[in-house]
Image: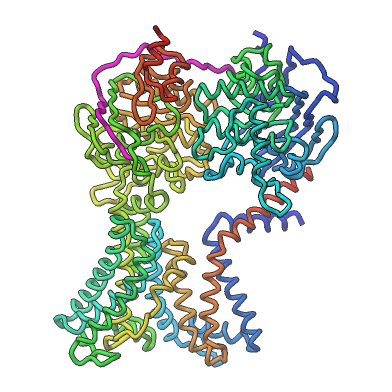
């Protein structure tokens, strides 16, 4: 294999190898962006260490790296949000100092952030002109001209955005296009897209890929920040890889496989598919029938939902964020009251129970939001490890006095057993740990309680590839121990990869349940978007 | 030069990482401003420090003599500050803002006065039951707020402020119904109700120091033990830091909130009991608030809601208040001590901002050093 010997043996992240496919040297004038020797330090971290990035004119250039690899820092420097400690930036051959985002805009650079910056009760046009409003002679806001221009731009790039729609009425995919329009309206010809597919359904991702191609054909240069290799393969021509703040290399996408790019990104070979034995489902451990749960606005988030999870299987809930997943989790774990219906664990009705009683009845919960629910960030690791059983022996005695020796040794045990990196040991505050290690604390705590039913929500969100691999293995191991696992994830890949059965949720209802392997991503995508399983059945026929 | 720079930075780092160190800095800043203010009004600030020295050690520089009584007065004066500080701090550790310390204090005071005047005159038991009832009264008064908050999501801030008024006026109406009471005082307490302890008075040559001090010390220990060492404290702290995580972990959040407010109220109620039976020989018809409950908020803030911190902050506030008459005799306006109290609270409030500024300048320095290399 070509990449043998590429992974750095010295572990320092130094690119000690020569890429065999060294790309042709292009003359400088061809380069839309030329960043050389960029270094940026934050107290205690070198976020960017002598990084080079050259992006050709009219190219789709991917910027690949794990969380914390320095992608966002590099782009923030290019967009003028940070000042580099060292290094030069050339835009179209001219050396520039980009002191703030306005300067970047003036240079024709536009950025679409991962979290949209839109005013929800404003129209598309109002959002686009915000900060750059054109005025009539009398100083009044001139929305007519702006609207016309937005419509033209939308037409030209095939964005199909209605300039008069309110943001709150349009889909997330459409909102993203509004963000793209915002940059085009300011005459950007270099577009930075930061993790654009994170919030989209598979269909919307396809459309986004088309939009990127369209932008390119209209002469724009695009930098795509991502960790999704499939998308890089689909649209990018070249790809620059960063790892732990260092420049690893730039490759021609068509010359390398996804596995090779992953290896460059992580520094070692990565398995995408989890090895997993065939499932061996037993009795039904979790049975939900006709469950309805209200959401925070008082509406039914889950409507008459029924679902069974058996011992020794992982059932995945696939769906776009906001289709009742949160309400379903809350309903099962007791954080919300069930409006109607029943939930049983090993045949025992739990829907009227308190959270505590449900925990004792055997419901484990790895929550969606680890900072909001999963951890008390100001507690130590040790205190967090006993969040659910601090009140029972051996952690507290009959008089209600805590035994900190037992609590600390319990934490030390979990730390070594689950490979949790807590520099200061059990007394380290959860707040000071990395996201991956925080998640490991939660997983260790929940698995250690060995619940019959484990509700796992978004277990790998925001984690790096190494942690993802580890956590997925742990979940499969729990399945093999005979637990019933309900996995809720917005990452379709994760669902496809881990689950034995897949239930698609849409508008609070189950749109279809399939054995894994029966459906492909696109059929799931259709159902996620709201068409009932009819569509999928038709396609299968 | 290098060493100096690094020591300077480590001091700054200490201030960023330690709440205690920052509190000390804040108190020093308060005194500094107070000193400047005395200079501005054209008096000699040494007078203030002389007064403070005499309160803390009993030593009068001008006369070169020790007066132990001042230490006793200082400790006696500090008792309600410490207890009301604990009240505020306990609620704060559970994520609640107990502005109702004053009301809980008044209820404790009223209950204690009633029992002192009308209860059976059995030695020791008389005042002891009066104090226990004062605590129960305060606990109920605080518990109501917790219950309203937990059950109906009534803001504890609004509820406690309103209950403060209700407590004050209810106390006036009820105390005035005791036979022999005029518009400002009841008849004298029976001797069995008094917290006076001859041995303490002898020890401090006739100060107001009374048996209450033992309850204050006990309260500090109980506070520390509950918060840091018990199952109950774990649940309360978890609720205070992150209510959602507490619910997720099966901790009964509603119960935690009610209990926390009740325990907070008990501390303030005890303060009321101790003041009424320790500092007076008769029951009072309150014409206004004593203010200890409100000062408790500041005490808890300065003490970072810890047991030891609140104890020290309470002693500080007690010291400032018992230094007032001495300051006046040193021709320092006594208002200065209120101003210093106020300044300390203001500086504590901007502590967050102070910390941000220090963190930022530390970062900038680190960045500069990195660039230099």
Q: From the image, which quarter does the C terminus of chain B lie in?
A: top right
Report whether residue A447 is seen.
no
The residue closer to the viewer here, A451 or B230, is: A451
**Which x, y percent locates residue A18?**
75, 16
Say which residue appears at 68% left-offset and 38% top-offset. A76
**Which x, y percent locates residue B53?**
53, 82
Say which residue appears at 29% left-offset and 83% top-offset. B196
Name the image quarter holding residue A524. top left
Say which residue appears at 66% left-offset and 36% top-offset. A148
Say which residue appears at 70% left-offset and 49% top-offset. A135
The residue closer to the viewer here, A132 or B167, is: A132
Residue A472 in magenta stretch: no
Residue A280 in magenta stretch: yes
Q: Which residues are magenta?
A: A267-294
Name the image quarter holding residue B73. bottom left
Report whether residue B343 is seen.
yes
The residue closer to the viewer here, A446 or B156, is: B156
Indicate left or right for A519 with B127 as reference. right
The residue closer to the viewer here, A129 or B169, is: A129
**Which x, y percent locates residue B115?**
20, 79
Rendered view: B306 above or below A251? below
Q: From the image, which quarter does the N terminus of chain B lie in?
A: bottom right
Please, what is the dominant secondary structure of the magenta stretch? Answer: loop
Name the image quarter holding residue A15. top right
Color encoding of the figure: rainbow
């Amino acid at each position: 294999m070509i990449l043998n010997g590429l992974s750095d043996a010295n572990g320092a992240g130094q690119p000690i190898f020569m890429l065999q496919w060294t790309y042709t040297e292009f003359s400088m004038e061809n380069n839309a962006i030329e960043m050389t020797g960029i270094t940026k330090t934050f107290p205690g971290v070198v976020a960017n260490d002598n990084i080079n990035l050259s992006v050709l004119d009219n190219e789709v250039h991917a910027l690949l790296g794990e969380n914390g690899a320095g992608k966002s820092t590099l782009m923030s420097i290019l967009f003028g949000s940070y000042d580099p400690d060292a290094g030069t930036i050339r835009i179209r051959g001219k050396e520039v100092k980009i002191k703030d985002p306005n300067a970047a805009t003036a240079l024709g650079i536009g950025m679409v952030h991962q979290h949209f910056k839109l005013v929800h009760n404003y129209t598309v046009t109002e959002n686009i002109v915000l900060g750059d409003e054109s005025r009539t002679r009398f100083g009044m806001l001139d929305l007519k001209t702006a609207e016309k221009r937005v419509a033209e731009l939308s037409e030209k790039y095939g964005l199909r955005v209605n300039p008069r729609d309110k943001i709150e009425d349009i889909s997330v995919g459409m909102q993203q296009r509004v963000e793209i329009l915002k940059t085009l309206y300011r005459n950007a010809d270099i577009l930075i897209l930061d993790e654009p597919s994170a919030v989209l359904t598979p269909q919307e991702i396809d459309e986004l890929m088309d939009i990127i191609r369209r932008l390119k054909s209209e002469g724009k240069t695009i930098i795509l920040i991502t960790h999704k290799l499939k998308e890089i393969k689909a649209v990018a021509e070249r790809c620059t890889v960063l790892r732990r703040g260092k420049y690893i290399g730039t490759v021609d996408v068509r010359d390398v496989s996804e596995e090779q790019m992953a290896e460059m990104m992580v520094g070692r070979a990565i398995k995408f598919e989890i090895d997993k034995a065939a499932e061996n489902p037993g009795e039904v451990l979790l049975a939900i029938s006709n469950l309805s749960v209200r959401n925070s606005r008082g509406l039914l988030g889950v409507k008459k939902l029924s679902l069974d999870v058996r011992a020794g299987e992982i059932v995945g809930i696939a769906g776009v964020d906001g289709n009742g997943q949160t309400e379903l989790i809350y309903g099962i774990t007791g954080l919300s009251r069930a409006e109607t219906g029943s939930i049983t664990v090993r045949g025992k009705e739990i829907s009227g129970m308190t959270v505590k009683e449900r925990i004792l009845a055997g419901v484990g919960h790895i929550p969606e939001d680890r900072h909001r629910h999963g951890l008390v960030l100001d507690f130590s690791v040790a205190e967090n490890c006993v969040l659910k059983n601090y009140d029972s022996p051996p952690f507290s005695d009959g008089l209600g006095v805590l035994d900190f020796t037992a609590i600390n040794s319990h934490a030390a045990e979990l730390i070594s057993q689950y490979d949790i990196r807590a520099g200061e040991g059990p007394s380290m505050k959860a707040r000071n740990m990395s996201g991956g290690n925080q998640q490991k604390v939660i997983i260790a705590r929940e698995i250690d309680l060995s619940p019959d039913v484990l509700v796992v929500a978004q277990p790998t969100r925001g984690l790096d590839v190494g942690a993802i691999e580890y956590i997925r293995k742990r979940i499969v191991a729990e399945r093999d121990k005979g637990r019933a696992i309900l996995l809720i994830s917005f990452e379709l890949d994760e669902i496809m990869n881990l689950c034995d059965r897949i239930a698609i949720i849409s508008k609070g209802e189950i749109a279809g349940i399939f054995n894994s392997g029966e459906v492909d991503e696109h059929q799931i995508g259709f159902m996620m978007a709201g068409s009932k399983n009819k569509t999928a059945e038709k396609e299968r026929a | 030069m290098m060493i100096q720079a690094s020591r300077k930075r480590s001091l700054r780092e200490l201030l960023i990482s330690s709440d205690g160190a920052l509190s000390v800095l804040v108190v020093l800043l308060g005194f500094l401003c107070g000193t400047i203010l005395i200079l501005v009004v054209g008096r000699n600030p040494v007078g203030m420090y002389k007064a403070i020295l005499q309160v803390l050690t009993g030593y009068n520089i001008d006369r070169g003599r020790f007066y132990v009584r001042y230490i006793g007065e200082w400790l006696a004066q500090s008792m309600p500050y410490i207890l009301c500080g604990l009240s505020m701090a306990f609620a704060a550790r559970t994520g609640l803002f107990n502005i109702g310390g004053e009301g809980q204090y008044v209820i404790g005071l009223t209950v204690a006065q009633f029992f002192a005047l009308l209860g059976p005159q059995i030695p020791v038991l008389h005042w002891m039951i009066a104090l226990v009832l004062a605590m129960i009264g305060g606990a109920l008064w605080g518990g109501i707020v917790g219950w309203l908050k937990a059950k109906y999501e009534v803001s504890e801030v609004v509820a406690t402020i309103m209950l403060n008024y209700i407590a004050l006026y209810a106390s006036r109406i009820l105390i005035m119904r005791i036979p022999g009471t005029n518009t400002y005082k009841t008849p004298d307490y029976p001797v069995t109700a008094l917290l006076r302890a001859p041995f303490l008075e002898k020890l401090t040559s006739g100060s107001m120091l009374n048996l209450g001090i033992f309850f204050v010390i006990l309260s500090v220990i109980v506070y520390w033990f509950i918060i840091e060492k018990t199952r109950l404290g774990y649940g309360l702290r978890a609720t205070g830091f992150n209510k959602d995580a507490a619910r997720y972990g099966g901790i009964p959040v509603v119960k935690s909130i009610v209990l926390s407010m009740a325990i907070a109220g008990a501390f303030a109620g005890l303060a009321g009991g101790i003041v009424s039976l320790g500092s007076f020989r008769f029951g009072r018809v309150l014409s206004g608030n004593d203010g200890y409950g409100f000062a408790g908020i500041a005490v808890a803030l300065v003490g970072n809601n810890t047991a030891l911190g609140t104890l020290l902050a309470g002693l500080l506030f007690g010291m400032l208040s018992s230094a007032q008459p001495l300051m006046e005799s040193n021709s320092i306006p006594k208002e200065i001590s209120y101003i210093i109290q106020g300044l300390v609270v203001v500086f504590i409030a901007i502590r967050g901002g102070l910390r941000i500024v220090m963190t930022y300048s530390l970062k900038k320095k680190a960045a500069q050093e990195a660039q230099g290399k």
